[in-house]
Amino acid sequence: MSTEIKSAREAMTIFKILGVKDVTTDRQRKNGTTVYELPISQAWQTLEPKPLRFATYKTGYVRNISESNSSCYQINKTKKRPAGTDGYHYETVERIMIPHWEDRLIYLAKFIIKNYYQKTTYIMSDHVMKCLREAYVRDYNNKPSNRLPFGDEVQVIVNGHRYNLS
């Protein structure tokens, strides 16, 4: 599956098909933050797996805020600043902010697909796979042209096995 997502509408369609939910609280929404929860959990969590969560902030940050992390971490792209700038005597790394809501959403969708749906380090239950297939078929059948904007076939790799959601 190509990760060429060009609009917020396409990103939201991808989220709907993959089962990514918006779990933003009223307070977060008021502050300009949006939180998304993936229907997968990390494989190394054995006692009580917690779902992966990501947040986009009005300030331009995109962060992984999963409960399993000791603290949230930024997933924005970075650029290096040479030594001697802004009074620092050593090379520093600076995050590149994403100023527009739509761009943050597109960046997050591409990041999630690239890092969580094409690797084998995360577990998806058979129930989640069944729900994903049903959602894809339902959305596919409701389209007037019976074509999704990003192509006919959606493939997800889970635990080393490729699943076609078509």
Image: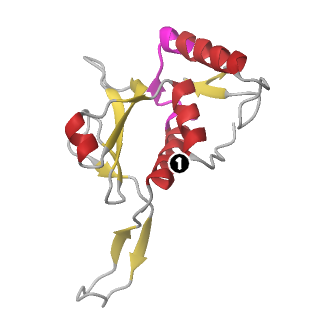
**Is residue 126 on the magenta stretch?**
yes
Residue lying at 56% horizontally and 17% vertically, measured from the top left: 132
Q: Give the left or right position of residue 80, taking residue 155 as reference.
A: left
Q: Nearer the viewer, residue 67 or 100?
A: 100
Q: Is residue 115 above or below residue 125?
A: below
Name which quarter of the figure residue 123 lies in: top left
Q: Is residue 127 above or below residue 88?
A: above
Residue lying at 24% horizontally and 41% vertically, measured from the top left: 28
Q: Nearer the viewer, residue 33 or 122?
A: 33
Name which quarter of the figure residue 11 lies in: top right
Q: Is residue 60 above or below residue 166?
A: below
Task: Provide the residue designation for mark 1.
Answer: 106
Q: Nearer the viewer, residue 5 or 86?
A: 5
Name which quarter of the figure residue 59 lies in: bottom left
Query: Which scheme is used to colour this image of the protein?
Result: secondary structure
Q: Where residue 119 sits in the image (x, y, percent)?
A: 54, 34
Q: Which residues are magenta?
A: 116-129
Q: Nearer the viewer, residue 39 or 142?
A: 142
Residue lying at 35% horizontally and 56% vertically, measured from the top left: 61
Q: Give the left or right position of residue 55, taking residue 147 as reference.
A: left
Q: Secondary structure at mark 1?
A: helix
Q: Where residue 66 sits in the image (x, y, percent)?
A: 29, 36
Quarter of the rendering occupied by the C terminus = top right
